[in-house]
Image (spheres, rainbow, N blue to C red):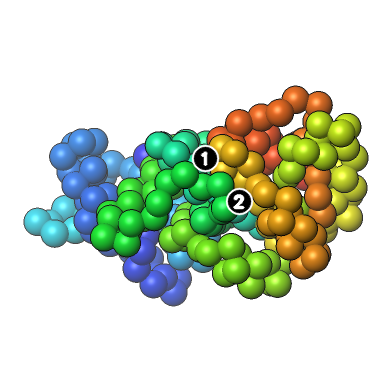
Amino acid sequence: MQRYFINEPFTNQTTVKIFGDDYHHIVRVMRMKDGDECRVVVDNGKVATAVIARITDEFVEANVALWEEEMKELSVHVVIASGLPKGDKLEWIIQKGTELGAAEFVPFIADRSIVKWEEKKAVKKLERWKKIAKEAAEQSHRQILPTVHAPLTFKNLIQLSEQFEQKVVAYEEVAKDGEQSNFAKVLSVTKPGNKVLVVFGPEGGLTEKEVNELQTHGFEICGLGPRIMRTETAPLYTLAAISYHFELMR
């Protein structure tokens, strides 16, 4: 059943209104009509089956029929911070990372980021990233819409990290030296409800200076096994490992 995120404030009303791109998707793509059902996700993360009651020229109105009880979100709030990569790699990270349960995506400008962030293209780029996250959240039946941030400076990333209980930096140089246990140790002490920030470098990796700075601010340096992964693969491996630890091992 098609799922739509409702942007309007929700205070236990019995009807919802669907506007914008979702309205056009219902009317033009799905060709729904009165009496058809869809699922709606409201701003508190609750999901309901809703029955279309009225279709106007501007919005679709639907009646809430049944609330979904099952929780489908990770029990920890995982934020993926990626050194700004080339091409469409960040789009891939956002799409697949959303499917795997990430709560936020924070691109940052690393020393070895080749891509230059152009402010004149910033609005459209960020809109595209958010759209990718929204579509992936609908497809994967998420109950929250992941937040996608505009790229931060490295200094801003350090400041952001102060609000997290667990902070990890994936560093390929320690992986080459055989470090394989730190990530598992971090997961073992992470509790449901904790906020976890995981930092990944761009294609050329993080510099030693950046890693030292992160370590100074409380980050645990981790290898992710014996194989060296691409910048777009490592976040997905990490999310899969977190999902396994907190969901499949329950």
Q: Say whether residue 34 is visible.
A: no
Locate the C terminus by quadrant.
Answer: top right
- Residues packed near mark 2 inside 10 Å, few (<14), some (14 to 19) or many (20 plus): many
Mark number displayed over residue 12: none
Q: Check the image and report above or below for 243 versus 110.
A: above
Mark 1–mark 2 distance (CA, rounded to whole Å) = 9 Å
Q: Answer yes or no: do the residues labelled 1 and 2 have beta carbons within 8 Å?
A: yes
Counting from the top left corner in percent of width and height, residue 80 is at 60, 51
Give whichever of 170, 33 is nearer the camera. Answer: 170
Q: Is residue 215 visible?
A: yes
Query: Where on the picture, by quarter, is residue 2?
Result: top left
Choose between 86 and 41: the one closer to the eye: 86
Which residue in the protein does label 1 denote? 93
Question: Which residue is found at the position 39% from the left and 55% from the top?
Answer: 117
The residue at the point 89 percent across, 55 percent down is 189
What residue is shown with label 2? 80
Task: Examine the rendered structure and indicate whether residue 90 appears above or below residue 151.
Answer: above
Q: Amino acid at mark 2?
A: Ile
Q: Secondary structure at mark 2?
A: strand
